[in-house]
Image (cartoon, grey):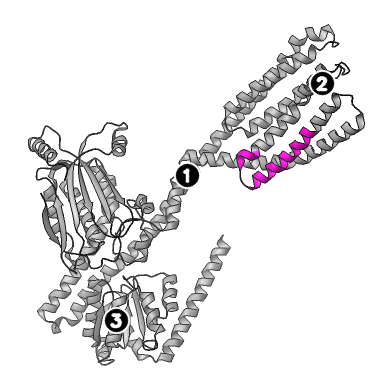
């Protein structure tokens, strides 16, 4: 069933929808402010580790360079027998590569690449500290010429060095489990090298027997260091997280402040025209009253009244938002026939906005379909959507309004109940064939205090609150609103409003639902 | 003699083109100029129509809103200033944009006068009458002085903002 209602067209079809939006820079601000606290926290953590790497790498690099030179000198000067010579050369190469890695790390810090920078810091530090003992052990196994005497001293030095390594890992780790893992690995390494060192033939049996006493001590110290680091990490992470939350709150407050400033500037502009028109016509009437014809007087009064209506509508829109926010939950729903509401709304579109030619409005809605909500709120939603559709599409193109029964949109369902239980809803669709809305600006449409750049640049009359109000009304009635648009001229926009159906216990509503189901698939 | 009587005696038979996309304001401005200033008034509802009407009616003065479809007020002023046939016509911007930067943009585009809404009918007619009463040289001189004043003001504000930071 399709009804056609003549709706007055817009005065200007060249402009695009009067939608709430914002300029590009504000879009960026919005996105920034929409960052979650955890995103912000991640950003802080990323920066902290990058800065730490930026401090440590320039310190480690020259030390490693000197160490590499020293290793090379020792290898050249000491006349080690094979395989110690090869081991010495290998160690010198590892140390030299460590220097190269540190330099690469400095490069990555400059490129703001935290992950590679940290790897370039940790890997050579581990290699430099941990490799000598296994290499020495390896050399020992290969050659009888290598004395076991210095291995205890070397091993103990390395064990001490593992504490430094643990601290380094603790500083650069992004969570406690990385530190726990590193501590376990260092425990295993420590136990391994100590068992080997203390049981080398020639160390004496007493050293071997005392291994049970030597080994637990470094392990305990390693876990003590790890414990202190974990405690410190927890405290600093909590602080960083709190700082992140403060920063998010600050960014959001700043964004709201900017939007309010912009809103005030915009409203200031929008108020001036109707104020001038209303006051001016009355003043003109007072100044020239005696010379005017009755038609002129009527015309002045009509213009003054219209300006007053515009002013009143603007002020009411602003007050409505406050009222709705304050009165949330006070709605007393009732069954509202959709088709009648659409037809009433079509008649209430301001005829002054439509001065070019007639417009075809195709209404395709089952007679019996009703929603469970407030008739005034539904009418306001429809007036706003129809008005936008009519104003911002070419006069010769139709505007289509359809309605049918659907399963609730999953996102709305999840938001409402916190789970995926979906109910049957009435979906009203308002489709136009105008310029459409750029997809990247769609998320901004329903925001308060914002306008799209193109609206700001054009002469589009509007308070920038219409769609925000629609969203408030829809959500207040337990529904949702969204828009689909490719942004391609001629393809236009499709606004969808989903609203709940009347409860099954209400007789006429039950009938309406049944009939609407029959008539679905419009 | 009242202000209205003074206005009645001046500038009669001059033509003013009013370009504004708001019907209520278009009616008010046109009626004020007709009834209080006895001007012949031609109207247009957007910048492009304004340009067209200008060359049809050859008005003595143009009152131009800024935010308009097709061609905005600044563009219309530039277009009229850029054409030798219309470059000498007094151009008055009448807008709800009240910030200094908007005013600067208005004068930079070539307007002779920048009026902000709301403005009463008498005040509006007086301003149009004043603009029409000035010679082109006087208008250019005044425009230049206003521009310099606004630019100086903006520089000072920028400096203060810089010091504030």
Quick check: is A108 in the magenta stretch? yes
**Chain bearing mark 3:** B
Instruction: Answer few, some or many: residues within 10 Å of disc 1's Cα (few below 14, many 20 plus, some between 14 and 19).
Output: many
The span from disc 2 to disc 3 (Cα, nearest Å) is: 97 Å
Q: Sequence order check: which comes first, mark 2 or mark 1?
A: 2
**Chain bearing mark 2:** A
Quarter location, residue A238: top right
Instruction: In the rendered structure, find residue A107 and report the number of the disc placed on it.
Output: none
- Answer with left or right where residue A199 lies relative to residue B124: right
Residue A376 appears anywhere in the view? yes
Q: Is residue A240 above or below residue A200?
A: below
Instruction: In the rendered structure, find residue B52 and report the number of the disc placed on it.
Output: 3
Q: Position of residue A316 (x, y in %)?
A: 24, 56
Instruction: In the rendered structure, find residue A139 and report the number of the disc placed on it.
Output: 2
Circles 2 and 1: CB atoms closer than 8 Å: no
Quarter location, residue B137: bottom left
Q: Position of residue B113 (x, y in %)?
A: 38, 81
- Total numbered circles: 3
- Answer with left or right where residue A66 lies relative to residue B59: right
- Residue stretch in magenta: A93-117
Q: Helix or strand or loop: what does disc 3 sit on?
A: helix
The span from disc 2 to disc 1 (Cα, nearest Å) is: 57 Å
Q: Is residue A441 above or below residue A249?
A: below
**Magenta-highlighted stretch: main secondary structure?**
helix
Q: Nearer the viewer, residue A119 or A22?
A: A119
What residue does disc 1 label? A248
């Amino acid at each position: 069933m399709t009804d056609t209602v003549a709706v007055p067209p817009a005065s200007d079809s060249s402009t695009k929808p009067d939608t709430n939006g914002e300029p590009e820079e504000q879009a960026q601000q919005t996105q920034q402010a929409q960052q979650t606290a955890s995103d912000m926290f991640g950003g802080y953590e990323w920066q902290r580790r990058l800065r730490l790497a930026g401090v440590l790498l320039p310190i480690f690099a020259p030390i490693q360079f000197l160490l590499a030179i020293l290793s090379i000198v020792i290898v050249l000067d000491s006349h080690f027998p094979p395989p110690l010579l090869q081991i010495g050369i290998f160690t010198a190469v590892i140390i030299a590569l460590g220097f190269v890695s540190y330099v690469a790390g400095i490069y990555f810090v400059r490129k703001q690449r935290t992950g590679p920078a940290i790897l370039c810091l940790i890997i050579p530090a581990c290699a430099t500290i941990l490799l000598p003992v296994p290499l020495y052990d390896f050399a020992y196994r290969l050659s009888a010429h290598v004395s076991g005497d210095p291995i205890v001293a070397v091993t103990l030095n390395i064990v001490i060095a593992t504490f430094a390594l643990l601290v380094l890992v603790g500083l650069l780790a992004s969570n406690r489990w990385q530190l726990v893992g590193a501590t376990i690995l260092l425990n295993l390494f420590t136990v391994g090298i100590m068992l080997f060192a203390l049981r080398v033939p020639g160390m004496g049996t007493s050293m071997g027997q005392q291994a049970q006493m030597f080994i637990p001590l470094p392990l305990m110290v390693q876990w003590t260091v790890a414990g202190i680091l974990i405690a410190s990490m927890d405290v600093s992470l909590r602080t960083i997280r709190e700082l992140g939350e403060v920063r998010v709150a600050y960014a959001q407050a700043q964004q709201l402040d900017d939007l309010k400033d912009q809103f005030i500037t915009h409203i200031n502009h929008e108020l001036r025209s109707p104020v001038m028109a209303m006051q001016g016509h009355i003043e003109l009437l007072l100044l020239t009253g005696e010379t005017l014809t009755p038609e002129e007087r009527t015309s002045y009064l009509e213009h003054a009244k219209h300006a007053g209506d515009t002013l009143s509508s603007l002020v009411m829109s602003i007050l409505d938002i406050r009222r709705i926010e304050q009165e949330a939950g006070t709605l007393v729903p009732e069954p509202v026939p959709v088709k009648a509401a659409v037809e009433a709304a079509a008649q209430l579109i301001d005829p002054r906005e439509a001065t070019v030619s007639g417009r075809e409005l195709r209404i395709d809605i089952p007679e019996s379909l009703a929603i469970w909500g407030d008739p005034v709120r539904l009418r306001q939603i429809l007036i706003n959507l129809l008005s936008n559709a009519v104003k911002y599409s070419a006069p010769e193109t139709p505007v289509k309004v359809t309605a049918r029964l659907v399963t609730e949109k999953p996102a709305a369902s999840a938001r409402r109940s916190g789970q995926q239980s979906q109910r049957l809803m009435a979906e009203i669709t308002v489709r136009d064939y105008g310029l459409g809305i750029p997809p990247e600006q769609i998320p901004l449409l329903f925001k308060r205090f914002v306008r799209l750049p193109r609206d700001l640049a054009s002469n589009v009359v509007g308070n920038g609150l219409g769609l925000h109000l629609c969203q408030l009304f829809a959500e207040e009635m337990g529904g949702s609103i969204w828009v689909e648009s490719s942004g391609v001229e001629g393809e236009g926009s499709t606004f969808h409003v989903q609203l709940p159906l009347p409860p099954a216990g209400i007789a006429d509503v039950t009938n309406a639902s049944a009939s609407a189901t029959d008539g679905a698939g419009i | 003699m009242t202000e209205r009587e003074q206005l009645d005696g001046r500038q009669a038979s001059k033509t003013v083109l009013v370009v504004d996309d708001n019907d209520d304001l278009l009616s008010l401005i046109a009626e004020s100029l007709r009834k209080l200033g006895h001007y012949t008034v031609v109207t247009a509802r957007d910048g492009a129509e304004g340009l067209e009407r200008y060359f049809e009616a050859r008005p003595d003065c143009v009152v131009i809103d800024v935010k308009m479809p097709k061609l905005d007020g600044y563009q219309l002023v530039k277009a009229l200033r850029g054409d030798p046939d219309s470059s000498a016509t007094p151009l008055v911007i009448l807008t709800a944009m009240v910030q200094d930067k908007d005013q600067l943009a208005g004068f930079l585009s070539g307007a002779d006068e920048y009026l902000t809404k709301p403005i009463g009918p008498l005040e509006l007619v007086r301003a149009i009458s004043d603009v029409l009463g000035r010679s082109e040289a006087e208008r250019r001189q005044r425009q230049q002085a206003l521009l310099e004043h606004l630019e100086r003001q903006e520089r000072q504000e920028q400096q203060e903002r810089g010091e504030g930071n």
